[in-house]
Image: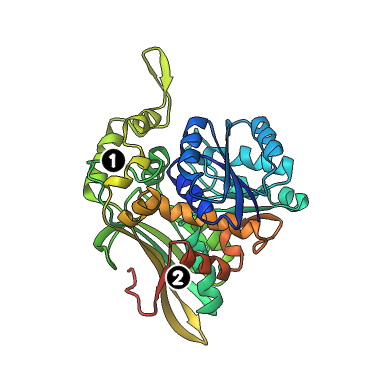
Amino acid sequence: MGKALIIGCGGVASVAIHKCCQNSEVFEEICIASRTVSKCDVLKEKLQGTTKTKITTAQVDADKVEELIALIEKEKPDVVLNLALPYQDLTIMDACLATKTHYIDTANYEPEDTAKFEYSWQWAYREKFEKAGITALLGSGFDPGVTGVFCAYALKHEFDEINYIDILDCNGGDHGYPFATNFNPEINIREVSAKGSYWEDGHWVETEPMEIKRVYNFEEVGEKDMYLLHHEEIESLALNMPGIKRIRFFMTFGQSYLTHLKCLENVGMTSIEPILFEGKEIVPLQFLKAVLPDPASLGPRTKGKTNIGCIFQGKKDGKEKTYYLYNICDHESCYKEVGSQAVAYTTGVPAMIGAMMVMTGKWNKPGVHNIEEFDPDPFMDALNTWGLPWRESHKPVLVD
């Protein structure tokens, strides 16, 4: 079918690359590119005897548009799948524009020097991508990503109007460390330590970090504490879901994680402001990232399950209705299949599916679009095929 250039070679990228190689009828060729090409070479060596997909590797600095353009022109991919850092979204989008190549990512842009993430920077590219005749698919992970597809599916098949959405992200896994993050520590800690917010009656309501707590009993995981966070898909869903009155996002955290995080905050280790150390400037959070366990190393240690989904309240044929779409994913099964824990798996699989949707032309809409703007049905079918089967309930327990 075609060729994908995959930028990044961390935990999520490794899952997406494994899945592309399983799906060799679509991904006839992939090029894995990273600043550290040796990581790409190790993955290539591991996979190339197990798949019909042709695998090549390349070195690239994703902060440099010129290098990215040169690589895209050399490889001539049908799509670029950005699994690098959110700081690099715009340089990769610039390179895709210059080469007229479709673009897919899993997380919205963040400036490196400001703990702030929103879609405005990427939405500013809408007209340019439309004029170039290429598609940019934003947020093709799980949340954002699958949660947006769930919303589009619920609106298409279950509701005439959705008024309330609660997105629940539960990781019931245990890796055995006193403190570790399940994805990039720098991104994870910035996200969790930021102020919370939710969308209600046409405006944002801001909360203090971790101020709002609820307890929820998750199927196959059990009762967990969850906390309201700001999350990027709220921003796009607020625009794209007609009739919406409120959208909230909750994520579960254990007490050990929160205690360690609070201590690290209190001593300044989560700061992104540079400090002088032995004559050199360092960013405390980046130093902390360097000493914490690599999320990619957690796979063989992690046991338990994730449970992520959306609870909807709205109307169908004039009557009030509730509906719950969700996925349960087992950490040990993920590790057995692709050598990853479930948090990376639940992001890497949808990344491959999003690239497949664009590459095959099932999703073809020039411009910059969030995932819920497309027909959800082929993506929902692909989730069942490629390892993230979804479940539904018509009588969910609601979050107060």
Name the residue nearer the viewer: 237 or 379. 379
Which image quadrant: the N terminus? bottom right
Relative to 185, 79 lies left or right: right
Amino acid marked by disc 1: Leu
- Residue farthest along the front direction in this orientation: 49
Estimate the spatial distance between the alpha carbons at disc 1 and disc 2, rounded to whole Å: 31 Å
Q: Give the residue displayed 38% in from the left and 39% down from the top.
A: 185
Q: Give the residue displayed 42% in from the left and 28% down from the top.
A: 273
- Judge whether 315 appears above or below 339 on screen: below
Q: Name the residue under label 1.
A: 261
Name the residue nearer the viewer: 304 or 245. 304
The residue tagged with tag 1: helix, strand or loop? Answer: helix
Q: Residue 107, position in %: x, y?
A: 51, 48
Q: Residue 231, position in %: x, y?
A: 45, 53
The image quarter containing residue 323 is bottom left
* Category of crowding for the residue at label 2, using alpha-carbon neighbours closer than 10 angstroms: few (below 14), some (14–19), many (at least 20): some
- Residue farthest along the right direction in this orientation: 131
Q: Give the residue displayed 47% in from the left and 51% down from the top.
A: 348
Q: Name the residue under label 2.
A: 164
